[in-house]
Image: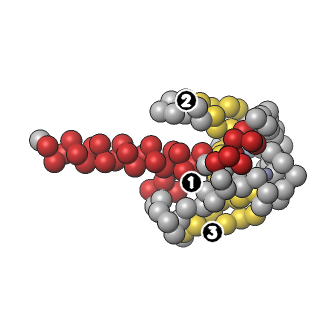
């Protein structure tokens, strides 16, 4: 598939069993099928970190908006992550897939982890 952000190609990466994402070989953007983001974040670690692009690269391509879903060829919706308003995620209303710029998924995983540790701390105190 063609990358919706640049003229790179999306290549399928197998992260874990039944967890596949498509990553652009140029801007390192990630095209994630519906439901896979949660799975990815649940198993997030050094071996499963697919977000290999640098954050500065992601920022550069973040300015490219109004992208089309590479699968359905329809315009994606922009969704703001409520926990991190600086992250704008492009999501396709037809197939439910999400496009993350390089660095965005790492941002999300850090947020999720810190939430996890907050809960953990709370649990030990009571
Ligand atoms: Zn790209
Ligand atoms: Zn789509």
Q: Which mark is residue 36?
A: 1
Looking at the rendered structure, the secondary structure element under dot 2 is: loop
Q: Which of the 4 image quarters holds residue 91?
A: top right
Is residue 51 rendered to the left or right of residue 12? left
Evaluate if marks 2 and 3 touch, with contact meaning CB atoms under 8 Å apart. no
**In the image, what residue occupies the spot 29% across and 43% down?**
118
Disc number lying in front (1 or 2): 2
Q: Which residue is mark 3?
A: 14
Is disc 1 placed on a helix, strand or loop?
A: helix
Mark 2 neighbour density, 10 Å: few (under 14) some (14–19) many (20 or more): few
Circles 1 and 2 in contact, beta carbons < 8 Å: no
Mark 3 nearby-residue class (10 Å; few <14, some 14–19, many ≥20): few
Q: Is residue 86 left or right of residue 69?
A: left
Residue depicted at x 34% and y 47%: 116
- Asked if residue 10 shows in the view, the reply is no
Q: Name the spot of residue 92 as percent of width and height, x first.
A: 70, 40
- Give the alpha-carbon distance from disc 2 to disc 3, as whole Å: 29 Å
Distance between the Cα atoms at labels 1 and 2?
A: 21 Å
Label 1 CA crowd tier, 10 Å (few <14, some 14–19, many 20+): some
Would you name the residue on which mark 2 appears? 85
Quadrant of the image occupied by residue 9: bottom right
59 or 89, which lies in front? 59
Q: Earlier in the sequence, mark 2 or mark 3?
A: 3
Q: Quadrant of the N terminus?
A: bottom right
* CB under 8 Å between discs 3 and 1: no
Residue 105, image x and y in percent? 57, 49
In the figure, is residue 51 to the left or right of 67? left
The residue at the point 58 percent across, 32 percent down is 86
Whichever of labels 3 and 1 marks the residue nearer the N terminus, that label is: 3
Q: Position of residue 111 (x, y in %)?
A: 44, 43
Q: How many marks?
A: 3
Q: Looking at the image, can residue 116 be seen? A: yes
């Amino acid at each position: 598939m063609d990358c919706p952000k640049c003229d790179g190609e999306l290549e399928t990466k197998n992260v874990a069993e039944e967890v596949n994402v498509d990553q652009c070989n140029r801007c390192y953007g990630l095209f994630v099928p519906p439901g896979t983001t949660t799975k990815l974040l649940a198993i997030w670690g050094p071996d499963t970190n697919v977000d290999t692009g640098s954050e500065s690269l992601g920022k550069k391509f973040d300015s490219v908006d109004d992208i089309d879903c590479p699968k359905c060829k329809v315009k994606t919706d922009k969704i703001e992550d409520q926990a991190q308003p600086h992250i704008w995620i492009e999501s396709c209303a037809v197939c439910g897939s999400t496009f993350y710029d390089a660095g965005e998924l790492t941002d999300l995983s850090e947020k999720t982890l810190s939430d996890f540790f907050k809960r953990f701390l709370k649990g030990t105190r009571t």
